[in-house]
Image (cartoon, rainbow, N blue to C red):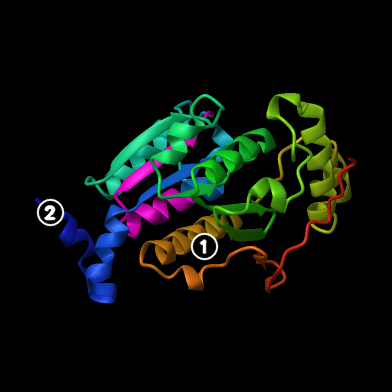
């Protein structure tokens, strides 16, 4: 059966009229294609965005099938290629550009070709590299994360950065001078703050030692991805005044039915 873009998104046009053309034409980049990032990409394509830039360095593993947007027959494939395959099945009219992770070599090209970037990465080093590039190119960023049964989001304008918001040890320093151990120590502090009352004690101790990534259930990753997609939608149709912009920070706890939208203040103190 032959179909057009208009056939797929006819109801979207009925909802917001010609403003949907802004959605169709916006270039959206997504860094990190785990549970949050892969869901954000899927939601964005289902909302009618057609210019997508994807970045990840990893391959699909068996454990990813349970909480990310991949299928069991894609295990072993690069996440970028597997997700591209899935997204084209949803909407064959999209254009997808792939990047092999985020590095100092490719970050400027990744950022400059996008109108807005969703950061769903785990690596602090990659986050800092991306954060600095976003500021250089004056681009907006939507930061999302998920852990356990919780999801969080905030939007960062070009005048601010993730690095500043979370008081990373790299602030004011060349990234090459920041050791992996320093980022690891920062991550340990974060884990102790957010994971203390969520994970079993024996698991929490291992998480605090960085022996495992932060475990999460599919709904929390899916939720943060969906939230990011809708913030992107607001950005596209000119509703920046409705976006959740720092210092405002959204946290949702699915287990205890908590919805918190408050001003964020980092609890991490780094030695100068």
The residue at which mark 1 appears reads as 227
Q: Residues within 10 Å of mark 2 (few under 14, many from 20)?
A: few
x and y percentages locating residue 79 in the rendered image:
47, 33
Q: Tell me, yes or no, whether the highlighted magenta stretch contains residue 44.
A: yes
x and y percentages locating residue 264 in the rendered image:
73, 64
> What residue do we see at 51% from left, 28% from top?
59
Q: Along the line of sight, which residue is nearer the eye, 220 or 260?
A: 260
The residue at which mark 2 appears reads as 3
Horizontally, residue 126 falls left or right of residue 46, namely: right
In this view, 62 is above or below 234: above
Q: Earlier in the sequence, mark 2 or mark 1?
A: 2
Q: In this rendering, does residue 217 appear at all? A: no
Q: In this rendering, does residue 178 appear at all? A: yes
Seen as rendered, the residue at the extreme left is 2
> What residue do we see at 89% from left, 40% from top?
272
Horizontally, residue 243 falls left or right of residue 123, namely: left
Res. 131 image quadrant: top right
x and y percentages locating residue 228 in the rendered image:
50, 58
Measure the alpha-carbon separation of dots 2 and 1: 29 Å
User: What residue range appears in magenta?
Assistant: 39-57
Q: Tell me, yes or no, whether the highlighted magenta stretch contains residue 55.
A: yes
Q: Tags 2 and 1 in contact by the CB under 8 Å rule?
A: no
In this view, 149 is above or below 133: below
């Amino acid at each position: 059966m032959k179909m057009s873009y208009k056939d797929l998104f006819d109801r979207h046009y009925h909802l917001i009229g010609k403003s949907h053309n802004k959605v169709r034409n916006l270039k959206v980049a997504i860094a990190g294609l785990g549970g949050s990032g892969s869901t954000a990409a899927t939601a964005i394509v289902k909302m009618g965005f057609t210019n997508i830039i994807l970045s990840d360095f990893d391959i699909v593993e068996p454990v990813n099938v349970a909480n990310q947007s991949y299928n069991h027959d894609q295990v072993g494939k690069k996440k970028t290629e597997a997700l591209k395959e899935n997204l084209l099945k949803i909407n064959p009219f999209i254009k997808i550009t792939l990047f092999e992770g985020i590095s100092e070599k490719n970050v400027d090209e990744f950022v400059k070709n996008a109108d807005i970037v969703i950061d769903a990465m785990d690596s602090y080093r990659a986050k800092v590299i991306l954060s600095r590039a976003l500021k250089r190119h004056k681009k907006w960023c939507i930061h999302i994360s998920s852990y356990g049964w919780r999801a969080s989001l905030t939007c960062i304008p070009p005048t601010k950065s993730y690095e500043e918001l979370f008081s990373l040890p790299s602030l004011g320093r060349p990234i090459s001078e920041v050791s992996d151990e320093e980022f690891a120590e920062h991550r340990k502090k974060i884990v102790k703050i957010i994971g203390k009352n969520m994970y079993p004690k024996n698991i929490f101790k291992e998480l605090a030692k960085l022996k495992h990534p932060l475990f999460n259930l599919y709904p929390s990753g899916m939720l943060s991805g969906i939230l990011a997609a809708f913030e992107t939608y607001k950005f596209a149709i000119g509703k920046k005044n409705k976006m959740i912009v720092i210092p405002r920070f959204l946290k949702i706890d699915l287990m205890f039915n908590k919805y918190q939208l408050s001003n964020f203040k980092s609890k991490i103190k780094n030695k100068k």
